[in-house]
Amino acid sequence: MNFWGIINLKLLLDVLFAVGFGLLLFSRVKEQRTLWLLRGYLFLVSSAWFIQRYAYLPLTSKLIDAVVLACSLSLAILWQGELRRLMELLGTGRLAVLLGNPPKEFRATSTTITQLVDTAGKLSQNRRGALIVVDLGSDLRPEDFLYSGTNIEAQLSTDLLINLFATDTPLHDGAVLVKGNKIVSAGVILPLSRQGISRYGTRHLAALGITERFDRCICIVVSEETGTLSLASQGKLERPITSSRLQELLSKFIGNQNSMGANKASLSKNVLSQNTESSDNIISDINKKESETSEIFINKKD
C-alpha cells in the first residue's frame, strides 16, 4: 500500500497552513467577544470545506455557503476598522506588525511623564485644545497619518509643547508626535475613528482612530471647550481624568515599556559582569602563578 496515497501531501500542507493562519488570528485577538465571533466563523468555514470535500450533500453545502457569506458580510461591517488596518499594513509592507514583532526599546524617563502631565494640566486650565500622541514602540511613520505635519526633532519640554498648541500658531489644530524624550513632529492630522461619532469631538475621534490601528501608542487629549483631560489607548477612551490619574496612567504605560528595556539591559549587564569576573579570575590566577615562580627563583638564588 502506497503511504503517500493515504496521506496526500498537498492536503497536509493545506491543513497545516490553515491551522497556522488560524493560530495567528487567535494570537492577535485580545477581546473575548471578538474571539468568540472568530471561533464561530472559522467553525462554519471548516464545516463548509469538510462537507464539500468528503460528503456529497449539495443542499447542505449550499446552505452552509449562504450562512458563511452572510457571516462574512456581517463581520466585514463589524470589523471594518480592523480590516482597514490590515490592508494598510499589507499595503505598506509592515508584516512584522501582523506577526507580533517585539517592541523596540523605548527611551523615556520620569521627566518625560512629568513634562507631559504639566503640559496637559496647564493646557486644561487655560482651556486650550491639545492632542499629544506618545509612540511606545509602534514605529509610527508618515504614511500612518493623513498628514505627517511639520518635522520638529526637538527635545521634549513643557514650554515647547505649550507653544506648539498656542491658538495663534498654524500647528495648534493638529497633533504632536512624541517618541521617548523627543518631539518628532507637530501639526499631524490623524485618521478618525467611526465609533462614538455622536458623542465625541474631532480630537477625541482622532485619538481613538490612531490607537485603534496601533496597540503600542497612547494619545492625550485636552478638550478646547471644557478643558477636560482624556487618555486613549487601544481604541478605548478614559475620560474625564484628573492630572494625578493621567500621571498614574502614563507611569503605567511608559513604565511597562521601560521595564522591557531595563530587563534587556540588566541581562546584558549580568553577562558582561560574568565575563568580567571570569577574566579577573584568570588574571588573578596568572598573577598568583607568577608570584609563586618568582619566590621559587629567589629562594634558589639565596
Image (cartoon, helix red, strand yellow):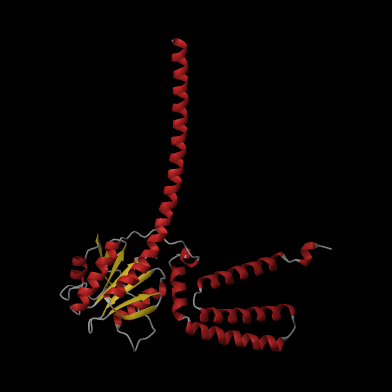
Pick out the residue farthest to the left.
168
Q: Is residue 43 left or right of residue 113?
A: right
Q: Is residue 139 visible?
A: no
Q: Horizontal and vertical percent for residue 202? A: 30, 82
Q: Is residue 57 visible?
A: yes
Name above or below for residue 207 compared with residue 299: below
**Residue 298 x, y percent position in the rendering:** 43, 14
Q: Is residue 66 above or below residue 110?
A: below
1 horizontally vs 154: left or right: right
Say which of 149 and 247 sits in front. Answer: 247
Residue sticking out furthest to the right: 1
* Front-most of residues 207 and 60: 207
Question: Residue at left 47%, top 73%?
Answer: 86
Quarter of the figure with the N terminus: bottom right
Q: Quadrant of residue 280?
A: top left
Q: Position of residue 141 (x, y in %)?
A: 36, 65
Tell me the quadrant of the picture where the C terminus can be found: top left
Q: Quadrant of residue 272?
A: top left
What residue do we see at 44% from left, 39% from top? 277
Task: Name which residue lies at 56% across and 81% down.
Answer: 36
Residue 168 appears left or right of 289: left
| Number of marks drawn | 0
The answer to which of 274 and 33 lies nearer the viewer is 274
